[in-house]
Amino acid sequence: MCQVVPRWATTDDLILAAYCRLLDRVGPQIIIAHSQGAVFALRAAARRPNNVKAIVAIEPAQGGGEEALAALADITLLLVYGDNVHCDARWPQIRARTDAYFDRLFARGARVDILDLPREGMARNSHMLMMELNNHAIAALIARWLMDIPGVSRPANGNHDDGKCDRA
């Protein structure tokens, strides 16, 4: 937790502008965002929809806002959740709000998939999924999902079902 970045609401506009500049610079990308970072990914994608192929939101803390709903309808989303939401007084309400937001996005025609880790047999994960001992298995599930969406390149050998991540 020593590397956690504090959240200051006064920097939201700067963060969003930085996301948009990065998307302008690198072109069409897949965004992977965690917790509070998901809102910035969603809002940047709404402002630069042609530069976003998909979004993987790992335990998103909120949706992208009302103004983003229409623009996000054409962007494929994966929501990744662990199983300890009930352990914190805030997270059941946060999850209910994000579920409602993504349900509205789905109703607009967006592809919104949910990776529920306990349903995949991966229990006892914290909010910090990337720091868990099974993070490679979680990453493999996300990579497998990414390989099944249109516009995402596949490995040249076509072998992406071995559960291992290729190194560049």
Image: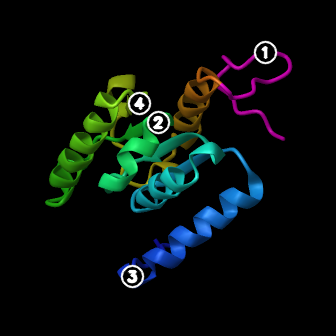
C-alpha gap between disc 2 and disc 1: 23 Å
Q: How many marks?
A: 4
**Can residue 58 be spotted in the picture?**
yes
Q: Secondary structure at mark 3?
A: loop
Report the span colored magenta: 151-168
| In this picture, residue 100 sits left or right of residue 137 | left
Q: Residue 8: give its label.
A: 3
Alpha carbons under labels 4 and 2: distance apart: 8 Å
Mark found first going from the N terminus, 1 or 3: 3
Q: Is residue 99 left or right of residue 52?
A: left
CA gap, disc 3 to disc 2? 26 Å
Tell me the mark number nearer the camera, choosing from 1 and 4. Answer: 4
Distance CA(mark 1)–CA(mark 4): 27 Å
Tag 4 near tag 2, CB within 8 Å? yes
Q: Position of residue 107 (x, y in %)?
A: 28, 29
Q: Which residue is mark 4?
A: 110
